[in-house]
Each structure stands twice: as C-alpha cells, then as structure tokens.
Image (cartoon, rainbow, N blue to C red):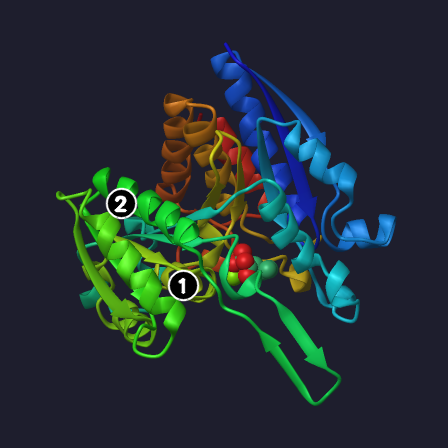
Amino acid sequence: MGNFKIALIPGDGIGPEIVNGAVIVLNKIAEKYNHEFDYSEVYMGGCAIDKFGTSLPQESINKCLASDSVLLGAVGGPKWDGVSAEIRPETGLLGIRKALGLYSNLRPSILKPQLADASPLKYEKIKDGLNVMVVRELTGGIYFGKKERDGDNWASDEEKYTYEEIERIARVAFNNAMLRNKRVVSVDKANVLESSRLWRKIVTDISKEYPDVTLSHMYVDNAAMQLAINPAQFDVILTSNIFGDILSDLSSAIAGSIGMLPSASLGASKRGMYEPIHGSAPDIAGMDMANPIATIISAAMMLDISFGLHDEAKAINNAVDKVLEEGFRTPDIMSDGMKKVGTKEMAALIAERI
Ligand code: IPM
Ligand code: MG
C-alpha cells in the first residue's frame, strides 16, 4: 500500500469535468489496490486569473512542488483572450512546466483497433496499427526565448537551444526508443535554422552512446507530410518545443481523436505533470459531453511513471479498452451502432471495470 499526494489542476472549460472523471477512476484504484491518494486542488489558468489576478499564483507552484505528482485538465478560453501576455492562462501553463523543471514531454499516439473508424486516414495507411511517441522538448526554444515588441512596428521571438537542453531531451528519446522499436527520427529545420544545426549535431553525437537505436533526421515540413501519408514508419519522434507542439496535434488526430491521448511532462525527479493533449473546449464545457479518456489514461501514466504502480496503470488501460470494446462512446468518437455516453458515465463505466 502506498500513500501519494496528487495535486489536481482542473483549470478551465471542460477541465474540471475530465479531472473529476480521472478522480473517479483513481479512487477505484485506491480502493481496489489499497492505496491512499491525497488530493489537493490547485488554481491555474483562467480560473486563477478570475480569483487571484494571475494565471499562476505562487501558492499554486508551492502546492505542486509539495506533491508527488500533478494531474492537469486544461486551461484557457476566449474569456481570457484579451488579458495581458504575462498573465494569460497559457503563460501559466508554460510557467508551471518551467517551475517544476519538466523539460521533457512524452506524447504517445496509439490508434486503438476499436477506433480505426475514427482516424481521418484511409484504412490502408493504418491497417498495421499506429504507435508513435512524440518526445517534445518542453522548457526551452522559442516558447521561452527573448520576446521583444516595438508597438505595431515589429515583434520578435527567439529560438535558442543550449547543449545541455538538447542533450538531456535526446537521452529521453533514446531511452524511450530502447523500450520500444529502437528507432528515433529527430525532427528539425537544419536546412534553415542555426539552432536546428546544433540540435542535429548534438543528437547525432549522443546517438553514438545508443548503438542499438537507429537514428535518422527529418525536416519538420517533410515530417508533417510523412505523418499524414505514412505514419506507420515512425517509432519515436524527437523534436523541439514548437515543432513538438505542432506535430503532436497531428499525430494525435491521425490516431482517431485528440480526446483519447494522454501526455507526461517529466524532469529530473520522479514528480511529473500529466495532462491530456487536448485543450479546454469551452464550447462544450459543463455539458457532460467531453471525453475523459485522455485524462484517465494520463492518470494511468502518472501511476506507471511517477509512482511505479505498473499493475494499477495496466488495470486502467485494460478497463478503457474494455469499455470501448463494449461499444461505449463519448460524442467525439461516436460512430454508427455504438452507445453514446457522457463524461460522467464514461468515467463510471471505466471505474466499474477495474
Ligand atoms: C500544448 C498546448 C500548450 C503548448 C499551450 C496551451 C501553451 O498547445 O500543451 O500543446 O503550446 O504547449
Ligand atoms: Mg499544443
């Protein structure tokens, strides 16, 4: 039996509903496997702007630092589009990643056979399945580079990477590949960008320490095309913050629904932050329509990676597969002949099957 402190960041839009869904499932795990999960709720994003005037209050950072791991729903929405850049919900999200030192972001895209219909790609392209892991650098590059602005005359954002930043994320990718099919495609724009040329050199140097892993390089424009025309060629994609942001939306979309895919943000310690890849979907907030599966599988990743509870993580993933096999679907993955359910019912069905 274990005792774990979990910081919950419900956030905005559908965030609270999907995090509730994950808590229903976590509670079932606690009961069945005799663990104790202590939750503390943390304000971040638009809701924190409304309450405290900033998207990331210091107290929220402290609560996350005092936890064993963080589970996040989603932040942001049109309500806060007009607020100044320093306090935007997205700035809070970038800030908490940085404050917790979470430099690597794992975004697995797995096409479940039960959902082959939901992929926008032709059956021919996905018939052999799809299992891509995007390893995105998360606390460097242009999202954190120097920002400058001269009124409406000009603005600039700087893309800068250091040796250390590239080396540590490259290791994450190679270590992941060792547990998978041992192939890494490093994605950059080395035909144009100096930062990409450094990226490519360092990734190539580090790869020599992983002789079992096959490394290749791809320009980001080609990588986007290859994901659309032949996604089965990829095992691990290693890339920078901005390219990973873009390519992971694409890789998740071809796997059926962005509502299905989890992510883990990790640093040097065991503490991670786990969140669905999708956003806060304000248009369906509060309507019990959102798909909680990405958040529920994110919670499973937390058990697996941060808490070492491998059987428990497997139990959650098996329960999700079972519910899908039985034909239950939230609206985003609904197809003919299936049974439509809401957020709460989907979470309850998964919990029941653990
Ligand atoms: C993501 C999101 C965030 C990012 C935004 C909301 C800041 O798009 O997690 O992919 O760009 O990292
Ligand atoms: Mg994104």
Up/down of 38 relative to 99, above or below: above
- Please report the residue visible at 55 percent of the width from the left and 34 percent of the height from the top: 348
Label 1 residue SS:
helix
Question: Around disc 2, counting alpha carbons within 10 Å, would you say few (fewer than 14), some (14 to 19), or many (20 or more)?
Answer: many
Give percent across and percent down for residue 28: 54, 23
* Three-letter residue code for mark 2: Phe
Up/down of 33 relative to 232, above or below: above
Left or right, residue 211 beside residue 298: left
Q: Residue 174 bears which disc, if any?
A: 2
Q: Residue 156 bears which disc, if any?
A: none
Res 61 → quadrant = top right
Residue 18 visible in the shown view? no
Q: Earlier in the sequence, mark 1 or mark 2?
A: 2
Up/down of 212 relative to 222, above or below: above
- Please report the residue visible at 67 percent of the width from the left and 64 percent of the height from the top: 283
Residue under numbered circle 1: 253
| Figure quadrant of the C terminus | top left
* Three-letter residue code for mark 1: Ala
Question: Around disc 1, counting alpha carbons within 10 Å, would you say few (fewer than 14), some (14 to 19), or many (20 or more)?
Answer: many
Gap between marks 1 and 2 measured at Cα: 25 Å
**Of the residues tagged 1 and 2, which is closer to the observer?**
2
Q: Are marks 1 and 2 in contact (CB under 8 Å)?
A: no
Front-most of residues 126 and 181: 181
Q: Residue furthest front?
A: 163
Front-most of residues 244 and 76: 244
Residue 40 visible in the shown view? yes
Label 2 residue SS:
helix
Give percent across and percent down for residue 312: 42, 23
Give percent across and percent down for residue 252: 40, 59
- Please report the residue visible at 77 percent of the width from the left and 41 percent of the height from the top: 58
